[in-house]
Amino acid sequence: MFVIDDDRDVMQQYPYHIRDVHISDPFILADPVSRHYFTYVQFADTSRFPSLPAGRGYFFVLESEDLIHWSEPAVCFEKGDFWADLDYWAPECHIWKGRYYLISSFRAEGTYRRCQCLVSDSPRGPFRPVEQTPVTPEGWHCLDGTLYTDRKGNPWMVFCHEWLQVEDGQICAVPLSEDLGKATGEPRILFRASDGPWTGSVVKGGGVTDGPFLYRLRSGKLLMLWSGFTRRGAYAVSYAVSQSGKLAGPWKQQTRPLYAMDGGHAMLFHTFSGQLMMACHCPNDHSRKRILLFEMEEEPEGIHVINEVTGNWYNGIGGHASRYTYTQPCRELPCFSMDPRG
């Protein structure tokens, strides 16, 4: 086992400990060029970092060598003459054709929320819009766009058509142009929230679909992580498996979640030592959201949690485990099975 200690020299360069990082919908890019990890936030802790700009219309990037100690947030996108200044939600960074694409949702006053791509030659930014118009369909209220590349090498945006507009939330997809700037076909509904056996009623939030993320197992099976609410009203993450191995599905849902203790909006990545990891936020209470990092086990038919390594569940678990939350701070040092620095 590899323990991450709070080394003084590391903390000078990376002063933001993972237990302090306030973040929603965490997406972690393991950048093969710099061999650093990057994550992106839409709000900054200006009380801790007073030099940062406050207000709407920004994305900030954080950088890490070990997944535990993170840099001071730095601006990687600012609105300028961009069309939207509201609902900068769930930014995630993908590498496509050697460039870095930041995908997020955006909204302007009086308009629906929609998704589109920003581009940069560096994971640190600055990012700029690929196009001045969104990718998701006109007249649809959407969020949580993610990039998927099919077996022919064609890019797709997979996203959520919001339950606020359709009640039974949808996971949908549109084919993209080569520069990820435009949709090149009609949207396809892949499945709905009510297809998940583990979800609750719409009254309790069970109509929600959040955070799709695609991952192909070594066996060739195609998984999609997604989040919603359980029958007990807890935020949770589960996954579906494509029976055809293609984006079109049909998608077979898991009968129970991967994690159902008020954490969700998950994604998968590999550390530089090759360990499969899952990142999500917990609890689903905005002011208290932190990153949970799980070491994962991959099997031919699916994935399982091995261990949560940050300790952020200690004060944040909810749902059916809420009565087991500890009130005192966690003092355990983060412990990985392999050094995440590779």
Image (cartoon, rainbow, N blue to C red):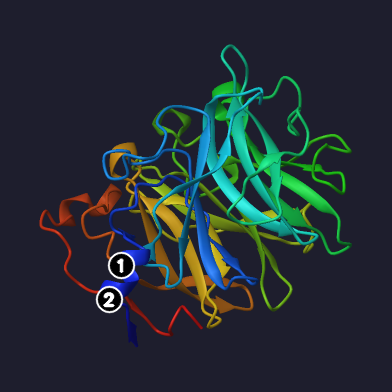
Query: Would residue 179 appear left or right of 58 to someone viewing this image?
Result: right
**Image height of 296 relative to 229, above or below:** below
Contact check, label 1 and label 2, Cβ < 8 Å: yes
Q: Is residue 6 visible?
A: no
- Residue beneath label 1, please? 11
Q: Give the amino acid type for the residue marked by disc 1 in the picture.
A: Met
**Image height of 119 relative to 334, above or below:** above
**Mark 1 → mark 2, Cα distance in angstroms:** 6 Å
Q: Give the amino acid type for the residue marked by disc 2 in the picture.
A: Asp
Instruction: Please identify the quarter of the rendering in which residue 303 is found.
Output: bottom right
Instruction: Say which residue appears at 73% left-offset and 45% top-offset.
Output: 157
Q: Mark 1 Cα within 10 Å, few/some/many (few <14, many 20+)?
A: some
Label 2 element class: loop
Instruction: Say which residue appears at 47% left-offset and 37% top-offset.
Output: 206
Q: Is residue 207 visible?
A: yes
Q: Quadrant of the N terminus?
A: bottom left
The residue positioned farthest toward the bottom in the image shown: 1
Q: Position of residue 275 (x, y in %)?
A: 51, 79
Query: Would residue 110 appear left or right of 175 to someone viewing this image?
Result: left
Q: Position of residue 294 (x, y in %)?
A: 42, 68
Instruction: Please identify the quarter of the rendering in which residue 331 is found.
Output: bottom left
The residue positioned farthest toward the front in the image shown: 51
Task: Say which of 23 and 241 sits in front.
Answer: 23
Task: Say which of 121 and 27 sits in front.
Answer: 121
Task: Say which of 38 and 114 sits in front.
Answer: 38
Q: Mark 2 Cα within 10 Å, few/some/many (few <14, many 20+)?
A: few
- Residue beneath label 2, please? 7
Label 1 element class: helix
Instruction: Say which residue appears at 34% left-offset and 72% top-offset.
Output: 10
Instruction: Say which residue appears at 58% left-offset and 54% top-offset.
Output: 124
* Label number found at residue 104: none
**Image height of 326 relative to 230, above or below:** below
